Image: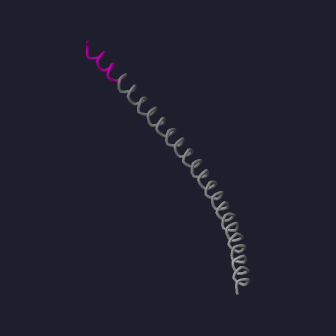
Amino acid sequence: MNLETQILDLMLRIRALETSDRLGAEVTAIGIVLALTELAEIRTEIREDLAALSDELAALRRHMNDHLAALRSEMLHRLGTLR
């Protein structure tokens, strides 16, 4: 190979590497954006699930308080009849 051919070959290889680096950076940026989007969706789902769980717990507390009040009333009534 003569010197001119070697220089041309090196220039082509450098351009290919530069293009590859740019494409790699773009692919990485796209991957980061997709990961952040997925993370935001997961956070939204978790918030919704936690809100639903909070509602379920509030309903359970009300339900248990109703049962406790009924049991307490029944116990007091039985205690009153025993005296």
Q: Left or right: 25 with respect to 48?
A: left
Q: Left or right: 75 with respect to 18?
A: right
For residue 38: magenta?
no
Image position of 39 with respect to 54: above or below: above
The single residue placed furthest to the top in the displayed view is 1
**For this rendering, which residue is in front, 5 or 17?**
17
Q: Left or right: 4 with respect to 27?
A: left
Q: Left or right: 20 with respect to 50?
A: left
Q: Quadrant of residue 68?
A: bottom right
Image position of 59 with respect to 11: above or below: below
The single residue placed furthest to the front in the displayed view is 82
Residue in the picture at 57% in, 48% down: 42
Return the x and y of residue 44 as percentages of the image width and height.
61, 52
Residue in the picture at 72% in, 84% down: 80
Where is the C terminus found, in terms of image quarters?
bottom right
Colouring convention used in this rendered image of the protein: one colour
Return the x and y of residue 3 as percentages of the image width and height.
26, 17
Q: Quadrant of residue 13?
A: top left
Where is the N terminus found, in terms of image quarters?
top left
Return the x and y of residue 31 as percentages of the image width and height.
50, 39
Image position of 68 with respect to 21: above or below: below
For residue 5: magenta?
yes
- Could you tell me what secondary structure mostly forms the magenta stretch? helix
Identify the magenta region.
Answer: 1-11
**For this rendering, which residue is in front, 11 or 79?**
79
Image position of 38 with respect to 48: above or below: above
Residue in the picture at 71% in, 79% down: 78
